[in-house]
Amino acid sequence: MRDKRYIAEHRGGTLNKEQHRLLVIWACDCVENVLSLYGNVIDERLTKAIKTARKWVKGTASVGDARNASINAIALANELENKTAIAIARSVGHAVAAAHMADHSLRAAEYALKAVKLAGKSMETERKWQDEHLSTEIIDMVLASRNEKKKHPTVEKPA
């Protein structure tokens, strides 16, 4: 069962539009903070996906646009061999997918952390950065979700 905190009010959850926008912004910020780990040339599907997510926040892209951009980012992840780049592409895919389902924002942050780990960088420093960039309107729900996940971990599919 999905967490009602991440389901829009008009769909029976408690997530208001501003919280939803803030989650998408935060997810994009998380992935942009690690994008430099992708490599020298960033695939345009990733930059287009991030732009689409940011346009959705402004109301100039549809959920369908975001869904298509997410599919393209995940398709890229499936084409790649470099594990860090794969994690970044998946992070982008989840960041833009958060326009459709806000809880994807959490996965975007997790994949950004995974990319940092795979690149041999400090996950602790990155998590601190992520936490510092949470707005006051969403910090409690994100931190509560993270704590609940620690208490009830699930089996994760291999990337």
Image (tube, rainbow, N blue to C red):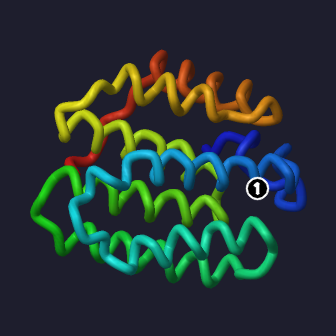
Q: Quadrant of the N terminus?
A: top right
The residue pinned by badge 1 equals: 21
Would residue 119 appear left or right of 139 to someone viewing this image? Answer: left
Quarter occupied by residue 141: top right
Up-down: is 135 above or below 148? below
**Image quarter of residue 17:** bottom right
Q: Position of residue 54 (x, y in %)?
A: 66, 67
Q: Nearer the viewer, residue 17 or 132?
A: 132
Using the image as rendered, state which of residue 65 and residue 125 is in the foreground.
125
Measuring from the top left, give residue 71's x and y in whole percent.
Answer: 43, 77
> Toward the viewer: 133 or 111?
133
- Image height of 23 relative to 134, above or below: below
Q: Does residue 41 lie above or below 62 as drawn?
A: above
Q: Residue furthest front?
A: 40
Whether residue 22 is situated above or below residue 113 in the rendered picture: below
- Pointer 1 local density, CA inside 10 Å: few below 14, some 14–19, many at least 20: many
83 sits left or right of 6 in the view: left
Q: Residue furthest left?
A: 81
The residue type indicated by label 1 comes to Arg
**Helix or strand or loop: what does disc 1 sit on?**
helix
Percent position (x, y) of residue 148? Answer: 56, 22
Number of residue marks = 1
Q: Residue at horizontal 79%, vertical 70%?
A: 58
Residue 144: percent from the left, percent from the top? 65, 23
Q: Residue at x 75, y 65 (%)?
A: 57
Image point (69%, 74%), residue name: 55
